[in-house]
Image (cartoon, rainbow, N blue to C red):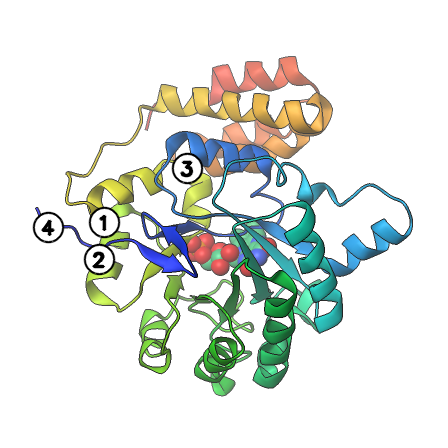
Amino acid sequence: MTPIASSFHIGSLLIDPPLLSAPMAGFTNLAYREILRRFGGVGLIATEMISARSFIYKEAHGEDAPSRLWGIADEPRPLSVQIWDNQPETLAYFAETLTRDYQPSVIDLNFGCPAPAIAKNSASGSYLLKTPEKVGAIVERVVRAAGKIPVTAKIRLGWTRGTINAIDAAQAIESAGGAALTVHGRTAQEMYSGKADWDAIAAIKPHLKRIPLIGNGDIKSAEQAAEIFRKFPVDGVMIGRAGLEKPWIFRQISQLLRGEELPTEPPLAKQRDLLLRHFDLLASQTGVEKAVILMRKYAACYSKGKRGARQFRTAVCTARNETEFRKIVQELFPIET
Ligand SMILES: Cc1cc2nc3c(=O)[nH]c(=O)nc-3n(C[C@H](O)[C@H](O)[C@H](O)COP(=O)(O)O)c2cc1C
């Protein structure tokens, strides 16, 4: 069978397969990234977004670096570190530090977060899409600071439906030296409602001269990812939430893209074991007590859509320690659909 999509480059970095895992605050920490690597199939793995200002503050006050930096110095590459702020100099300082002390494969700038704490209260993330010239100025400064490390940007379609300006932002990013553009096909105002608008993502492609376009939004299955590549002129796709429910989805898509048959889903008992393995990894990084709490949200993702998921979720939230957590998972993880 003929391959459906092939690799592409971000600067000189080969992205193969052309599948990227999305940055997700509170989720894409070191343990989750390790789970993704075990399954494989991800061309580029992303961290959570990290606040440049908070890094600088902690450094100035002699505090430990933000926990979102855990793992980054030593874990396998390729790895994209996402950073956010609205001040070019603040971002440039953090990018310089990352380049010197952590050497990620990619530094990604967040121009897409719509959360009020970031967009409204901090005039950052998707708020910056209101002023593409400011986006350009930030990219230009961070590209200079990052030296040989490629700098990419992640945007939404615009601030509101009435003010969609992703093409302006895309051109500003490319002209400023950005090395790739990821577009989530919603506006900031839409948050996560409605459907991602892939036609609007595709409309950006003719306006980019040099850099790859990565589309993002609502991909839930391997077939759907393959269909996106067939239908839309994107170089890569980024997947977020579906990767939390099925971390093996990237491997499935990569097989499908190579023209192989669609692999079956792992048996539910294996999915339950994975959840326990995920707990072990998280516990080794955060300590057991914290991991029991943090696993609530991952357990909800792993069980989503399965029969008995609600009962399982509710029970996981009552676990007070590791023993209780393991018992609940063993007894209540929905292994019948
Ligand atoms: C819980 C959560 C946290 C997120 N955190 C970030 C983030 O830190 N940086 C970012 O650029 N996007 C963030 N996003 C947006 C995702 O990267 C992605 O654009 C969005 O979920 C759409 O892709 P999907 O439909 O494949 O999930 C987050 C999304 C979710 C659901």
Q: Could you say which disc has been placed on residue 2 in the image? A: 4
How many angstroms separate mark 1 from mark 4 (CA)?
A: 15 Å
Q: Is residue 228 above or below residue 70?
A: below
Measuring 46% from the left and 81% from the top, which residue is drawn there?
171
The image quadrant of residue 322 is top right
Q: Nearer the viewer, mark 4 or mark 3?
A: 4
Using the image, tell me which numbered label, if any, was put on residue 227: 2
Q: Could you say which disc has been placed on residue 223 in the image? A: 1
* Any part of residue 160 in sight: yes
Left or right, 118 with respect to 82, comes to right
In the rendered structure, the answer to whether residue 229 lies left or right of residue 79 reads left
Instruction: Indicate which disc, 2 or 3, sits on the residue closer to the N terminus.
Output: 2
> Hey, which quadrant is residue 56 in on the image?
bottom right
What's the distance in space between the residues labelled 3 and 1, CA to CA? 16 Å
Tell me residue 168's x, y (percent): 48, 84
Quadrant containing the C terminus is: top left
